[in-house]
Amino acid sequence: MQTEILYGPAYAAAKLTLAADETVRAEAGSMLAMSAGVSIETSSQGGVMKGLRRAVLGGESFFMNTFTSGADGEELFLAPPLPGDLVSWPVENTSLYVQSGSFVACSGGIEIDTKWGGAKTFFSREGLFVLHVTGTGGLVLSSYGAIHGIDLQPGQRLTVDTGHLVAWTEGVGYEVRKVGGWKSTMLSGEGLVCDLTGPGRIYVQTRSQDAFLGWLIPQLPQPSSSS
């Protein structure tokens, strides 16, 4: 699977070039276009229970689409539902964690499941469960806004707003805390933050869905009350 990211960082799409008989699993609804020789099959990927865990706990679709190339050079175009960027992340026999809603697609050698994030994640945007990615192959992730990768050295610490965290490798330490006292937490607009400690790689997004919804919802017309 050769991946080319097009049109980022505002309205990115991924162009995947496939070998003959190569398969790609993608989030339902992400297909933009595909070559005539690419076939599609829809299933829960791993059975009903695994599909339910992804949908109910991981925030992804119950069904996933499997695309299979009929010949070398067939193309598949994918796009996320929100305006933003995409990143191609080669995974080699390792594990990483992805926030709800950021998974777009992966090659056949990668498994996607949900994992208990621990009670420390309860108040973070990621919630109690995160997506757990394992295996070897290509992975495509989306962000709201542009996406930025950071490599943390052993012991290096970085504080990230919980609404801006996209993904991180398994070796990265993850702790949620208030940004300061309760006054700062409630009034600063920052809320809760994650302290991430290396070694490992993380991806952050330049916009927050929660912040956008917090601005948008008060602007929407309110239904008039009937007398």
Image (tube, grey):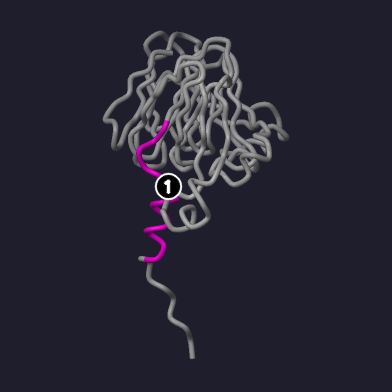
Residue range in magenta is 204-218
Q: Residue 24 versus residue 20: which sits nearer the camera?
A: 24
Furthest-right residue in view?
49
Q: Residues within 10 Å of mark 1 (few under 14, many from 20)?
A: some
Q: Residue 79 versus residue 85: which sits nearer the camera?
A: 85
The answer to which image quadrant residue 9 occupies is top left
Determine the secondary structure under disc 1. helix
Furthest-left residue in view?
7
Picture layout, residue 107 above or below residue 72: below
Picture layout, residue 89 above or below residue 147: above
Q: Position of residue 96 (x, y in %)?
A: 56, 22
Q: Amino acid at mark 1?
A: Gln
The answer to which image quadrant residue 10 occupies is top left
* Residue occupying the point 44% across, 19% down: 89
How many numbered marks, from 0 up? 1
Q: Position of residue 30 (x, y in %)?
A: 44, 34
* Residue occupying the point 36% across, 42% down: 207
Picture layout, residue 92 above or below residue 222: above
Q: Quadrant of the N terminus?
A: top left
Q: Position of residue 16 (x, y in %)?
A: 39, 19
* Residue occupying the point 44% across, 9% down: 19
**Horizontal arrangement in the rendering, residue 128 relative to residue 13 (left or right):** right
Furthest-front residue in view?
181
Q: Residue 135 versus residue 167: which sits nearer the camera?
A: 167
Circle 1 residue = 209
Indicate whether residue 206 is drawn in magenta: yes
**Horizontal arrangement in the rendering, residue 51 relative to residue 18 (left or right):** right
Q: Main secondary structure of the magenta part?
A: helix
